[in-house]
Structure formats: C-alpha cells, structure tokens
Amino acid sequence: MNAERDQQICDFRLEDTDSKEEKNKMDINKLKETIRAEIERGQYSLMNDELFGYVFGMPPMELPVHGDRDLVSRIAARCELGDEEHIFAELQLVNYMESRALPLACCATMYSAQPEYDLNPCATVSILSYGLLEKKSWYSDYHFHNLETGDLLDNGMGLHFLEVPKFKREDGKPLSSMTRPERWMAFFAYCLNDVEKKELSEIDPAIGRAYDAAEDFFKDAKNVSRYIDRETGLRLFRAAMQDVNKNGKDRVE
C-alpha cells in the first residue's frame, strides 16, 4: 500500500510540474502576442537593444561584466571627439549588480590607456531603461571632488547618467523650446504622439532619421522576431527582479 501511495504522490507531482511548465509556456506565448500587437499599433520600446543597435548602428560588444551577460548591457560604443575627448556610450537594460560600477571601470580604463604626458578628458554616457539614482532628475553627472571642500580634483573623468523613466515632458513646453538632450530623451521615452513625432523630426533631422530607422527595422520579419524574443526576456527578468525585491532579497540567484 505504501508503495502504491508513493507512486500516486509521485505521479501527482509530475503532473503538477507539467501543468506549471505548460502554464508558463502559455503565459510566455500570451506575452509575445501582446508585444506583437503593440508593434502593429506602432508602440515599441526603443530601450530594446535589438532595436537600439539597429537604429544607431551600435553592434553588441563584450563588456567587463559579471553575472548574466545576456541581460546586462550589450550595446556600447566608443568614440573620440577629435583629439580632445574620449566618449564611451552604453545602453543599460536592467539594474543588475554592476550598473554603477561598469561606467566607472570603462572610464578609468580609457583614461589610464593614454600616455601620461598627453591625458585627454574621458567620459561615459549611460542610457538607463530604469531608475538607478536617488536624484529625481533624469540627468546626473559625477566627477571627483573633495568631500569636505567640494574642490574638483580633476576634470579628466566624468560619468553621465540618463535615466529614461524619469524623463517627463513639461506641460505645455513646445518641442522647439526643448534643449537637444531633452529632445533625445523624448525620443527614448517614446512619449510623443504621431503629430509631435513629425514636428520633432522636422526640428531635429537626426531624430527624424532615427524614427525612420526604427520603422525600417520592423519591416523585416526576422528583426520583429528578435525584438519580440528580446522584449519577452527583458519583461520576464524585470518581473522576477520585482518579485525578489518584494521578498527583501537584493539579487537574483
């Protein structure tokens, strides 16, 4: 009798496991259908690195990160403004462990790689698809200061953070009155209607070209598939992170 009961319990557990896996598959398929419907309505996230990389011509590159490499920053580029300043730009998708440390490490690496007799300023620009810092403003910059006196030690390294979710367009502020950074943040935050997008494209042709590139991206079925898969993974990961934070844990195991 005990053997029969144990087999029944085992069968129940297997059946329960199968039903959970099936439910998860159904939930994922439903999420993918939702994302596909958003695309058909012209609603998409520019904070998806598949789309971001296509629009700005920034292919994925290896970064000095730990943990899940597929979900931390995959899009990054290094450029030079003449011989005067080195810039490292990156897109951070999820808040996972090295979100603060990565820009500092990249900036320090660029700065230290230069000849000691010819040091040029270096800076990182991190575009974040989440809120990271305590400051309410969407823009934050960091430099090396003396904590007591406030004196700037050196302006050779600077860290700049653009937190897209914190950007809110001021009520009634014309697009023509926005600064260029504000116009790009409006682009990233995707907070404009079709009429405003057209107006913004006329004001800033570079943003207009970025909108056009985004539209071209979705004309390719393979791009659509990659976007949906990536967006699904990102949303599931963020949901898992929220659940973990609610339980008082500080990271995903």
Image (cartoon, rainbow, N blue to C red):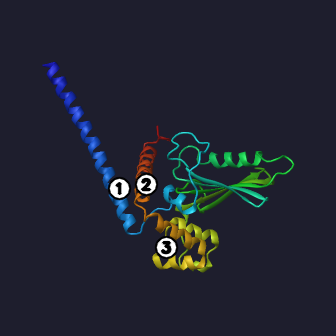
Residue 253, position as x, y percentages in the image? 46, 37
Residue 173 visible somewhere in the drawing: no
Looking at the rendered image, the disc whose residue lies closer to the viewer, 3 or 1, is 1
Q: Is residue 146 visible?
A: yes
**Disc number placed over residue 226 in the picture, else none:** 2
Above or below: residue 47 compared with residue 42? above
Q: Earlier in the sequence, mark 3 or mark 1?
A: 1
Q: CA distance from mark 3 to mark 1?
A: 24 Å
- Crowding at dot 2, Cα within 10 Å, few <14 / some 14-19 / many 20+, comes out as few
Q: Nearer the viewer, mark 1 or mark 2?
A: 2
Q: Earlier in the sequence, mark 2 or mark 3?
A: 3
Q: Secondary structure at mark 1?
A: helix
In primary-sequence order, the first of circles 1 and 2 is 1
Question: Where is mark 1, residue-wise?
Answer: 32
Q: Residue 30 at x, y = what percent? A: 31, 55
In the image, taking residue 69 as reference, residue 240 lies left or right, namely: left
Dot 3: within a 10 Å radius of its alpha carbon, few (fewer than 14), some, or many (20 or more) residues?
Answer: some
- Mark 2: secondary structure: helix
Instruction: Between residue 182 and residue 206, name the one nearer to us.
Output: 206
The residues bearing labels 1 and 2 have C-alpha atoms spaced at a distance of 11 Å
Q: Secondary structure at mark 3?
A: loop
Q: Is residue 100 left or right of residue 233?
A: right
Residue 158: give its label: none
Query: Please, what is the three-letter code of the amino acid marked with disc 2?
Result: Arg
Tell me which amino acid carries mark 1: Lys
